[in-house]
Amino acid sequence: MNYIGSKVIETKRLVLRPQTMKEQKHLWEILMIPEVNRYFLTVPPKFRDKLLDWEKQEEYYQKDMEHALDNDVFRWSIFLKQTGECIGRLSCQENDCGIEDANIRDVGWLISPDYQGCGYGTEAAYAMIDYMFQEAEIKEIRTGAAIVNPASWHIMERLGFTRQKETKWIQYTFLDAPVEDYTYRMTREEWLAKKKQ
């Protein structure tokens, strides 16, 4: 794996930039929209109230942004090229399923509801995944999405991820009961082969 950090990535309509504190309150406001966070956050539910309070969260974000440019951090804010507006974020982080291989990663993204359904999520995710496989040279992505959230897993399937037989039950932060998730995988070899087609 190449630890090269979150370089700027441009697509046809978007610019993915390493995160800065400047856009974090706006991204937090997007994240606090129930239709966005319902199947995204997996922080223990006991922290719900703290998450809803920007004054409590701001200190966390400031500390987090101190490492945004570290070579082992792969997180981006998503900006529209045409207007410069920040519409979401995405990341490729170490897998938290007991896998100790940093070459096997998880991915996640969120897009403001105002811009969902326009293909921005797929466009941004494609660019990030391509960067992670081609330049960072990770060997595999293992990820998942709530079965009841087809908008998310449809992106994974459009990108060529393979749905696995096993599912997982995930306790999302703002839901009272665990939710069943599809699980997905893709290897670097599979991604590069698909690009050649």
Image (tube, rainbow, N blue to C red):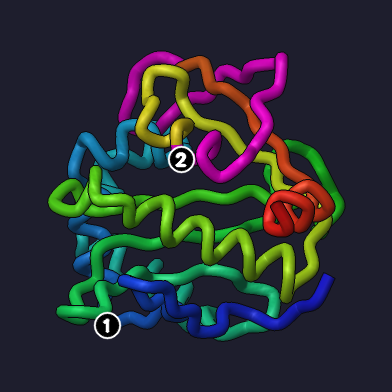
Q: Which residue is drawn at 72% across and 52% down?
A: 191
Q: Mark 2 points at which residue?
A: 155
At numbered mark 2, what does the secondary structure look like: helix, strand or loop? helix
- Mark 1: amino acid: Lys
Assess whether residue 16 is covered by the magenta stretch. no
Near-viewer residue (71 or 138): 138
Q: Residue at x 18, y 57 (%)?
A: 29
Q: Say which amino acid is labelled 2.
A: Ile
Q: What element carries label 1?
A: helix
Along the line of sight, the residue nearer the viewer: 20 or 88: 88
Relative image position of residue 194 (x, y in whole percent): 70, 50
Q: Indicate yes or no whether the magenta region holds residue 173.
A: yes
In the drawing, does residue 52 fall left or right of residue 123? left
Q: In this view, does 24 lie above or below 112?
A: below
Extent of the magenta region: 155-178
User: Is the residue marked by circle 2 packed among few (<14), some (14-19), or many (20+) residues within 10 Å?
Assistant: some
Circles 2 and 1 in contact, beta carbons < 8 Å: no
Residue that label 1 marks: 22
Looking at the rendered image, the quarter that the N terminus falls into is bottom right
- The residue lying at 47 percent from left, 16 percent from top is 178
Q: How crowded is mark 1: few (under 14 residues within 10 Å), some or many (20 or more)?
A: few
- Counting from the top left corner in percent of width and height, residue 134 is at 73, 70
Q: In which quarter of the image is residue 30?
A: bottom left
